[in-house]
Image (cartoon, coloured by chain):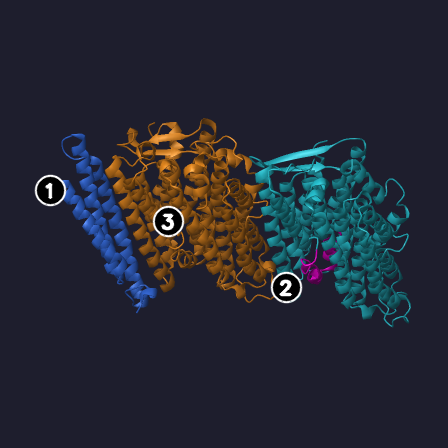
Chain colours: A orange, B blue, C cyan
Amino acid sequence: MIPGDGAGGALMATVALPLAGSLLAVVLGRHGAQVAGGVALGVGAAVAVLAAQVAGGGVLRVDLGGWAPPLGIALMADGLAVAFLGLGAVVMAAVVAQAAALFSTRGGESRAGYGFWPLVMVLWAALNLTFLSRDLFNLYVALELLTLGAVALVAIGGQAGPLAAALRYMVFALMGSLLYLLGAVLLYAAHGTLDIDLLAIRAQPAPPDLVAAGLITAGLAVKTALFPFHAWLPPAHAGAPAPASAVLSALVPKGSFFILWRLWFEAMPDLAAPPVLTLLAGLGGAAVIYGSALALMQGRLKMIVAYSTVAQLGYLFLVFPLAGGAGAAQPWEASAWTGTAFQALSHGLAKAAMFLAAGLFVMAVGHDRLEGLRGLARTMPMAVFGFGLAAVALLGLPPSGGFTAKYLVMTAAFASGQVVWAGVLVVGGLLAAGYLYRPMAALFADAAPGPLTPVPRRLQALPLLLAGLAIGLGVASDAPITFLAIGRPDAAAEGL
Amino acid sequence: MIDPALLYGLTGAAVVGLGLYGFLSLRHLLRRVLAFNVVGSGIFLMFGAAGYRGAVAEGTAGADPVPQALIITGIVVALAATALAVGLILAHARATGRRTLPEDDT
Amino acid sequence: MAALPILILATALVPAAITFFLPQAAHGVRNGLNLGGATAKVALVVWMLVEVAAGAAFETRIPLAPGLFLLLRVDALALLFLALSAALWLLTTVYAIAYFRGKPDQSRFFGFFGLCVAATTGIAMSGTLISFFVFFEMLTLATWPLVVHKQDRASLDAGRLYLGCALPAGAALLVAIIWLESAAGPVAFTEATDLDALAPWAQRAIFALFVAGLGVKAALVPLHGWLPAAMAAPAPVSALLHAVAVVKAGAFGIVRVVFDVFGIDRVAALGVGLPLAALASVTIVWGSLRALQQREIKKRLAFSTVSQVSYIVLGVALIGPAAVTGGLVHLIHQGVTKITLFFCAGIYDERAGVKRIEGLDGLGPRMPVTSACFSLGALGMIGLPPMAGFVSKVYLGLGGLQSGAPWVLGVLAVSSLLNAAYFLPLLYRLWALPPAAAQPDEQVWGLLAPTVVTAAAALLSGVVAAWAISPLGLASLIVERDYLR
């Protein structure tokens, strides 16, 4: 299909619009917020159109420039990709709204005020490309763009702490890029293509491909901050300005995980040997426990929320032994697959809500140490309520998207007899209750807060809205689940 | 005589190994960025060799053009990453006077 | 009319959702909304009662995910719990409006209050285990802001203890449900599920997980610690926790698990009924003993709840027809009696500043209406004829004999003696000691009227127990119709 003819237009727009917006924001300087607002509207509309197309007509493929793989690059919108595009659009819209207010009150003349808009839009373009692309090298470029944008966003404030965090992030990310690239080169040397669908036909469960897949997986795991490569994430996510943190925590790791997902479920499903899958899930389980334990020990709200990201990303890796390899043919595969997609979506919404709420608390009291948040439940009820709802989704309590995810994955764990992963879910949920209880208790404590900067109510509505969506994902999960299954490989019709 | 593609490939692998060692063992941030570029060059070398070998195996004259395109793209990406990294290192050095990450200080 | 269950849920959910966004000053709107919702709910439940009596069945299915759906189904047992929660919600709303006059954070309170009631309603109407779990956890969450409502040190500690008990319990429940369903398929409450795919040890383990998960809310020893601590909450919250929502949800869940998940035959075959009955008996005696040691009125009442709610569990665990009838009817009797006592405790605190039992000295003649209601409630708890509590105890004792567990009589006797030992001194202080000097004013009709109504109900449901429409009549009907065919 040739881009530009109606059907591919919306798909192309999700990448082209933010990219163009990014350039425009550089040119227009102080009007970055308006540009981003326009881009958010445009991408939102494009994703809506794309969702309608995919829901009506199934998977949509576009060969760039009319060249089919292996020479050209294919973009593909299936249910999973469009769902993640939607997540990105919703989170970005909220982030743009809060950042516009934040940078205007601080004076748009600051460096952060100028730099934020082009960076966040280039990051968005890269993210959308990650969700759509079918070519491992194209994905590499998207991933690099995503990472560079993310690193720059961490450093945007210019203080020493975040700069060091950004550099550490950079070192890890470069390492991950090299591993990924090395794996991709090996794959190309063996098969003469990097197209996911062609690889699916050509890949062999033999040592060369295993080494290549291992390198790519390791590289992506570093970028997804999988235990034990997580050390860079908390200071980086906590150090960025709140709207940037929301993007970094809710969306950016999903990009690298998404590629990992495409690799093991679509490019080389036959390669997945049980030990590899178990190792991935084991590291994920360790991330859940270790990230939660460290979150319990933090004294600053944004650090708690950032360590929670390490833990929550760990859940995603449980999908590999449950739905990958030999598990793919089993009836519980659909539950694990869908549950994990739900976990990613629900976490994205809830985590963005939390960081936006944290940003408002910082705006009000000037810092994010827990003891400074005392009594905010009275003065900022809407933001606190949003934070609470987001916590419900992260804990996986009903009715929320997190609960649907936990239910589905746990069902798969019991059905497959791999009860240990159910144990991870239970322990992780309880630990999450522990580390999220502390900020909640502080917010509800009866203390007259010190001098507060007033926060407008419309800004408080943003986290509430996002958290409400995370809850709504659980209340009405039937339609999203049907949508996610569009174009899924070997979609078992019903599952458990 | 040794097959030139193999020679390129082996050289590339050696360069990658050298660079990786530097990347992991060095503390000075600028040196680490240089090491990153060394690894990148090694990978591109291997990539070129893979393209050449692929073309020879298929019996077509000249090299497979795809790796060359990818290498050029890769170099641009690496350049962008290097530029950002150097910028960050400079800003970090200006703010703190350090050339290394805090945890690597001895 | 298939939408009736959803409408009943909405009567609590919709006012709650709107209330959250009302400013503190919007008293008229807030009170109107909540009273309107509560009244509408009572009307709808009455309508439903009439329809069910005429043979109608209500079932509504809300799909969540493939294989995961909420099923709202109204059977006789559901109706019993539903009627209780609807009636007591209306009364508690009236009481709470009067209680909170002039206090801060009213919108937050009534919002979560409504959510709590909606969750309880959902628990009552749940037709499957998963639906039950969803509402059960919703109740946990909606209760926390109520427990910490005063935002002081004690409330926050109580809130932490509450979540610290309730969240692991929820996790245990979820594991039990998924373990069960992974072997037996989705569990609906229409008939006992076929669990033969599971080994007996696994079945016993699942049963234990269920009891642990539900036992925290039902305040079974040793999982009861949070309940007395939660007394730090305002009086209407205590009333709600003890009589309508949380504690009852736990007990109701145990009823469901025994009858509709495992089925009485399987419970008997697995031999898990007797340990449960023993646990309930220990709780009954231990709760009473601890109540005896308390000097704060609300704490004493709280430990009394620990003891009394286990009557329900005891009746169900004994399995015989009379015992089950006794347990089910106690769901209602304990509710109306205990809510009376908490309403009174709230009035003593609010109007006379009395929190500890010493303060009750000679208060009877000074606050005659409150004290009369309190006395009725206390006598009901002791089980003096013709109060409601007497009826429950008679049936439980009979049931013990029927089920070949005569030791139950001993438990009941000890418990009644202990009840008398911790309630009669209060009555003595109220009425026999010389009148206090203070002249407290109890004439707040918003506080008094609900108290009088529940006290009257506690008396009447005992007096008219023989009638078909009394709580006992309903409980007998449920037992005959659904459980012991």
Q: Nearer the viewer, residue C398 or A406?
A: C398
What amino acid is at disc 1? Ile
Q: Residue furthest left?
A: B1
**Residue drawn where x is 54% and y is 41% of the image:** A411
What amino acid is at disc 3? Ala
In this picture, residue C354 sits left or right of residue B57: right
Relative to A136, is C227 above or below?
A: below
**Residue drawn where x is 22% and y is 36% of the image:** B66
Chain letter belonging to callout 3? A
Chain letter belonging to callout 2? C
Residue C478 falls in image quadrant: top right
Q: Nearer the viewer, residue A329 or A466?
A: A329
Relative to C207, is B61 above or below?
A: above
Q: Residues within 10 Å of mark 1 (few under 14, many from 20)?
A: few
Asked whether disc 1 touches disc 3, contact meaning CB atoms under 8 Å apart, the reply is no
Quarter holding the C terminus of chain C?
top right
Dot 2: element: helix
The disc at residue B2 is 1
What amino acid is at disc 2? Asp
Write down the region rendered in magenta.
C220-243
**Residue drawn where x is 80% and y is 52% of the image:** C334
Q: Position of residue A120 (x, y in %)?
A: 38, 48
- Marks 3 and 2, how far apart at CA: 40 Å
Residue B69 falls in image quadrant: top left
**Does residue C270 appear in this view?**
yes
- The stretch drawn in magenta includes residue C238: yes
Q: Which residue is mark 3?
A: A221
The disc at residue C157 is 2
The disc at residue C327 is none
Quarter holding the N terminus of chain C?
top right
